[in-house]
Image (spheres, rainbow, N blue to C red):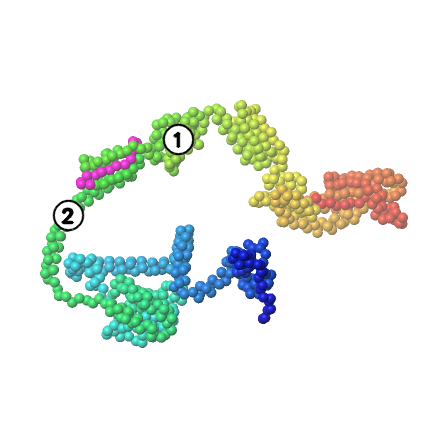
Amino acid sequence: MTSTVDPISLPQRTASNDTEIDREALARLLVEIARNVDPDYRARFDGVPTADPRMETLRQLLVSREISELSRVTHLLDEPEQLAAAVGDILPSAAARAPHAQLGEALAPAVERAVQRSIQKSPRTLTDILYPVFLPAIRKSIGEKIDQTFQSLNETLRHIFTWHGLKWRFESWRTGASFSEVVLKHSLVYRIEHAFLIHRNSGLLIAHVTADNATSEDPQLISSMLSAIQDFVKDSFNEKEQSGLDTIRFGDLRLWSEVGPFATLVSVIRGNPPEGLHEIVRDVLLRIHEESSQALEQFDGDGSQLASVEAQLQTCVELKQEESNEGFPWLVAVVALLLLSLAGGWYFLSWQSAQRWQAYVSRWQAYVSRLEAQPGIIVAEQQARDGQFYIAGLRDPLAADPQSLLSGTEVDPARVHSQWQFYQSLEPEFVLKRLTASLYPPDTVRLSIVNDRIIAEGEAPDTWIDRARAAARQLSAGGPEFDISKVRDVSPEARAAEHWQYYVSRLEAQPGIVVAQQSARGGHFYISGLRDPLAADPQALLSGTEVDPARVHSQWQFYQSLDPKFVVKRLTASLTPPKSVRLSIIQGRIVVVGEAPAAWINRAQAAAEQLSADGVVLDVSQLRELDLAELNHLREAIQTTDIFFSSGKVVPGPEQTPVLDRLADQIKEFAQSARKSGVTARFMLTGHSDTTGRETANASISAARAETVRVLLKKRGVAPELLLVRGAGTFEPAVPENSQAGSSTNRRVSVTVNLD
């Protein structure tokens, strides 16, 4: 790209006479150079005119891109969020390309400080991180130490009273080693015959070393089988990856497995190796990993880079402990026998003296046990020293005398030195004695101990009861409870208050009575609340309570109780259930069982809906509609029977007598059958007239005709309470009046049957 720019021409001024230099032009030139070199100077010299406008054009052509990049970088450095995002984009790749040593040295101080602050802030976080790593190792190390301890103890106990044990005890004394070490040295005879180093992930054999005169099969085959056994155990028992099978025993052979990060070292041991051998084999495996860690991690079957491993394994197969073939040390035996004789004599004398002292100490301990079992005595310290016995503690003055308890123990009182401090025991029997001595209970009050509580029962004046209450409050928190609730106040005021409370409790127990407020004031008693009219009479409940009715002022407000018993009474009065229906209360629910007419069932269902709003359950699900099939035929016959009258007459003619006889029989039969079914039958006699004459006269005639039929049916044995009469006048004609038989047919009395 080619650009044509006019050559820069600096402004010329005539030089001064003294220096021959145009200083103003020189200053403008320097300012322009500063503007182009550093953008910061551009802002500083905004007020200074440029030396040449073409200089700005030249600057844009030469450094405009650099100035733009520099401005972007400056803006990026001024914005922390953008700078952090930019650094985050390049930090992973920069860390990956950095040399490990330099990166570790650079990050080590920051990481150390961060870890230190994290531990100081929350130590449990580091514990949770290291717990899965260290716990298996600690558990295994503790297990090996315990096995080593038990192995040493077993071998020591097995040989402690044998001839070898005596010989080894002398060797222990001579060499300065412990007896258990000497026992393990001679009794634990072993030899490592094979050492297999197996890659942990692939199961391939890395190296194999065999001891002299040891035979084996194909090492690679053995390695594969060992790996297969390890995998089988892990898969079968759901073991974790870090754990594994560490010991296999077959006859006199033992296979010990030590697991490392990349390889497993399996040692084939013949004999009885000590548990401490684990640490030696583990150290060998650790050195192998330290020297060849990278080669072990990258092992793919080629063992050329692990040639030095066999030298480490060779140290394992060289480990062995053989039986010693020394001759019988007769001199040692004689010396040992002599020492044993002297020691035996001394031991017998010491034992005899110790037995006598132990018997005496046993008698002393029996005496101390008797003291400790005594209530009110606390033994704080006791010891036997230099043939003397010392005992100290706390003793309640009411407790047994320690000196008297020495009798029968065969302990010399002169050798017993005791020191007892005074204290008051909180044992119930001692507290009871003190209460009896301080309160002087009357003969009508009895104090006893029940379940570590002091119970006062009986009758006493109010002054004594007040003193007893004060004593109960003064008892220590750790002492027994002093219960005086069963002591009755025998003062007249207290008896009256007691009788009043008994009456109030009787009222509160009555269903349908709610006591809202009750008080005793000025020798009179006041009570108010709510009472259902069906509930018991509060005045009647006063009898037998010894409360004077004249001193009782009561005020009861009316309310309807939702107690099921009262609800059943109200339902019985309002619904009038037939005999075939039974109302009962089952688990707080009112259950209606039986058969009833459909109309009565509808009324019961409506009542159930109203009661459900108040929380009362009226169960009508077991109601069945009464089967009136047998009555319906007779009902239809009755309702189709009409008694006819002559015009203007209120008495039927002789021709209606058979009809009246038949109707009376049917009504009586229907009423009797209805009663057997549990319902009540009602018969409505409705009188009718034709349209002849005035309406008022027709209405009177129709009512008179119905009343006449009622009287005639009553004479024929029909119960009058079953018969109802009404006059319909001309409003309910059987046929139209303009028909041929209209007037004679409409002059009648009809019958309607209703069941309740």
In the rendered view, tell whether residue 660 sits above or below residue 222.
above
Expressed as whole percent of the image width and height from the top left, the position of residue 112 reads 39, 56
Say which residue appears at 36% left-offset and 27% top-offset.
438
Mark 2 vs 1, N-terminal side: 2
Q: Amino acid at mark 1?
A: Gln
Expressed as whole percent of the image width and height from the top left, the position of residue 350 reads 15, 48
Q: Quadrant of the C terminus?
A: top right
Query: What residue occupies the far front of the structure in this picture?
Result: 17
Q: Could you say which quadrant of the image residue 435 lies in?
A: top left
Q: Which mark, by number, is residue 71?
A: none
Expressed as whole percent of the image width and height from the top left, the position of residue 67 reads 55, 61
Between 621 and 154, the residue placed more toward the observer is 154
**Callout 2 crowding tier (Cα within 10 Å): few <14, some 14–19, many ≥20:** few
Instruction: Report if residue 442 is visible in the image.
Output: yes
Say which element carries label 1: helix
Q: Is residue 390 magenta?
A: yes
Q: Could you say which quadrant of the image residue 284 lies in?
A: bottom left
Distance in Å between CA atoms under marks 2 and 1: 58 Å
Say which residue appears at 87% left-offset and 48% top-offset.
736
Residue 671 lies left or right of residue 444; in this view the side is right
Between 198 and 657, the residue placed more toward the observer is 198
Say which residue appears at 87% left-offset and 44% top-offset.
690
Say which residue appears at 37% left-offset and 35% top-offset.
479
Instruction: Report if residue 480 is visible in the image.
Output: no
Instruction: Give the magenta range.
Output: 385-400
Q: Is residue 254 magenta?
A: no
Say which element carries label 2: helix
Find disc 2 in the rendering and name its residue: 350
Find disc 1 in the rendering and name its residue: 474
